[in-house]
Image (cartoon, rainbow, N blue to C red):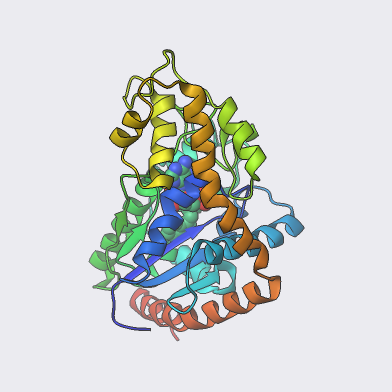
Amino acid sequence: MTNKKRIFSGIQPSGNLHIGNYLGAIANWIKLQDEFESIFCVVDLHAITVPQDPETLRKKTLEIAKIYLAAGIDPKKSAIFIQSQVSEHAELCWILNTIVKMSELEKMTQFKDKTQAGVSEGIGVGLFDYPVLMAADILLYGTEVVPVGEDQKQHVELARDLAKRFNHKFGETFIVPKAFIKEEGMRVMGLDDPTKKMSKSATSEYNYISLTDDAETVKRKIKKAVTDSGSEIVFSDDKPALKNLINIYASFSGKTPKEIEALYVGRGYGDFKTELAQVINNFLTPFQEKLAAITDEDALEILRAGAEKVRPLAKAKLAEVKKKVGFIS
Ligand code: TYM
């Protein structure tokens, strides 16, 4: 490992990865991997905070690793690994559990969303504790920058607070990380409801475009996407559905929203949607070809090598933490 600044990020192997995950996270990772020493994790410990079928979890874990690779994460530059293969994550989470407050976790919006307004009946403790595990992921590696979508900002804030609290209590130990959230793609909204983020756990498949959707499915889903009243293609806060579609168009085409508006003056939603589907497919088709060419064996080898590369870092930081809190080694 080098002395470049470090970035760490991860995705849960649950549900179908969608273009929101790509635009909010992976697309930025690819750009950052040259500048930073990069660690990208498949966070299976996080995935089991809601029930998972074991066989599906195994498949999805490999699929996420393959998606990282097909999208352009280069294993020569970046470490890719599975969270559960480095047990220090769970151990540090336990130690951080002793300095986090219940009230801090009760405030987490993602927890509130997942539990329907904070009703904890029937909810696993893991789901409640999820942000502390995420803080452990980040702090274990001396991470300086955490590239994520907007929905993870509050969790990164907690990691910052816990780093400062631990340092204050036990002496300088953790780097205080910063979230990196790029304006474009930071919050891709649902195609069926532009007031909610595009989500892998959405009940309707018309909410998202999966990274594995074929060209016809993309056309069908874009055709069905809700739009606002009127017929002009304008980028404005009063038209949240259209704004979301234009943002997606902009992210995949490299054009600005203004340029896209200009392209569609005097043309209606029909043309816009047909060409938006085309723009998305121009990205997805070659991406999916690369994805199909990566074998399970290749992915497993890269994941094992990734775990080997990061484990010494995790071990060293955890040893330092254990010493600071008073454990005998
Ligand atoms: P997860 O698996 O829900 O999402 C993975 C990444 O995708 C981003 N994202 C979005 N970005 C834009 N628009 C959307 N609609 C959208 N939906 C998801 C997320 O912001 C995220 O960057 N807790 C994390 C995983 C995690 C992690 C970490 C991240 C665990 N440990 C340490 C960074 C550092 C999560 O559940 O992401």
Q: Which residue is drawn at 39% across and 25% down?
A: 240
Whether residue 265 is situated above or below residue 211 in the rendered picture: above
Quarter residue 28 falls in: bottom left
Whether residue 319 is situated above or below residue 224 in the rendered picture: below
Which quarter shows the C terminus? bottom left
Identify which residue, 215 or 107, lies in the foreground: 215
Residue 103, percent from left and from top: 38, 43
Residue 13, percent from left and from top: 60, 56
Q: In this view, does 27 lie to the left or right of 261?
A: right
Which quarter shows the N terminus? bottom left
Q: Residue at x 53, y 83 (%)?
A: 308
Whether residue 21 is situated above or below residue 109 in the rendered picture: below
Query: What is the residue that sits farthest to the top in this orientation?
Result: 230
Q: Is residue 108 left or right of residue 200?
A: left
- Observer able to see residue 169: yes
Q: Is residue 198 left or right of residue 58?
A: left
- Observer able to see residue 42: no
